[in-house]
Amino acid sequence: MNKKAQRQPAGGPVSRFIQHHFRHFNAATLVDAARAYRAHLDGGGRMMVCLAGAMSTAELGLSLAEMIRRDKVHLITCTGANLEEDVFNLVAHDYYERVPHYRHLTPREEEKLLKRHLNRVTDTCIPEGEAMRRMEEAMLEVWVAAEQQGKRFFPHEFFYQVLRSGKYKKHYQIDPKDSWMLAAAEKNLPIVVPGWEDSTLGNMYAAAVIRGDLTNVHTIRTGIEYMTWLAEFYTQTTKKSPLGMFQIGGGIAGDFPICVVPMLHQDLGRTGVPLWGYFCQVSDSTTSYGSYSGAVPNEKITWGKLGVDTPSFIIESDATIVAPLIFAHVLGW
């Protein structure tokens, strides 16, 4: 192969486009992070994707579902909102309303949306009846059944039960291949959902306890149990493969799982467990003195989370644009 041919960007049209045009600043970091993601996998590594913000309502499933099916993602940590909103979109997409002029809505116009039971997420309104209440009914069935059998499950496991039952296929309003939760259920992908109670269905679960529909608040397994599960998963996984972390947004979805390494080292004395093998965070929140949720990669070194040689990237841009491009590159699109 001649040198000119060697310089040609690799992959499909999206990959070739970003490699040709994205040469500097955040754009160049995007390409560097995507190449390092691929290199991490090619070297036998495994990857955790963290979802904060409203990425499910942004329909990240269009690319994330294929990442899951193609074994480019091996663990997801997400907020309760991202866990449920992919399924809301799956069963109620036709009832969603887009509000392109959302920046100019008056308080009175917002109140009109409330009265129509449309909950706005930036430019997208989630219909309460068709999405949230439909899933409340489905989840209440599996919550009550588990309680009656004296069983306990994690939040994502209850979702898997509902999706695998097939009872709600008749309500699907998008192509099932575009739902990352369906892809995850098919793969039995591990999911960690810290702070699940801070979600619509978490609130509904609390209401069910208050009403007396449920008598045992512990039918849902807790965040501490998620951390103990993650500690064992990380310990066993990294005996064979380094585990990387691709974080979208800030907050608990990233802050919670990254702490497993210093906990293993400092609190459990498992000093032989390796540090995270890759790190990338995508967020349009500019890093500044203490106001940022989390810390830049160099600061994470001081907390025993990343190493000096860990491939680390921070892309200060809109994750709804950046994440699909990186996933496309990893997929060779």
Image: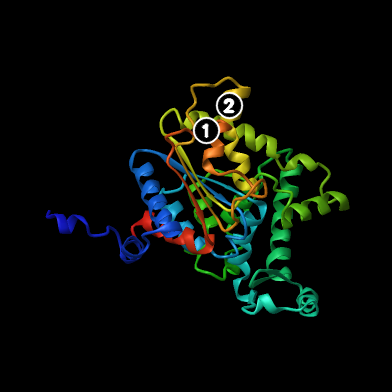
Horizontal side of 247 relative to 202 (left or right) equals: left
Q: Nearer the viewer, residue 248 or 42?
A: 248
Q: What residue do we see at 60% from left, 75% from top?
A: 94
- Which color scheme does this rendered protein use? rainbow
The dot on residue 313 is none
* Category of crowding for the residue at label 1, using alpha-carbon neighbours closer than 10 angstroms: few (below 14), some (14–19), many (at least 20): many
Can residue 167 be seen in this snapshot? Answer: no
Furthest-top residue in this view: 269
Hey, what amino acid is under mark 2? Answer: Leu
Quarter of the image where one finds residue 128 = bottom right
The vertical placement of 304 against 251, above or below, is above
Nearer to us of marks 2 and 1 is 2
Task: Identify residue for label 2.
Answer: 264
Q: What residue do we see at 64% from left, 74% from top?
A: 96
The vertical placement of 187 against 178, above or below, is above
Task: Identify residue for label 1.
Answer: 234
In space, the residues marked 2 and 1 are separated at their CA atoms by 9 Å
Q: Secondary structure at mark 1?
A: helix
- Residue 249, image x and y in percent? 58, 53
The vertical placement of 262 against 119, above or below, is above
Can residue 183 be seen in this snapshot? Answer: yes
* Category of crowding for the residue at label 2, using alpha-carbon neighbours closer than 10 angstroms: few (below 14), some (14–19), many (at least 20): some
- Residue 175, image x and y in percent? 49, 68
Q: Nearer the viewer, residue 310 or 150?
A: 310
Hey, what amino acid is under mark 1? Answer: Tyr
Q: Nearer the viewer, residue 91 or 14?
A: 14
Q: Secondary structure at mark 2?
A: helix
Furthest-right residue in this view: 211
Q: Nearer the viewer, residue 103 or 51?
A: 103
Q: Tell whether label 1 touches label 2 (CB within 8 Å).
A: yes
- Residue 309, image x and y in percent? 42, 35
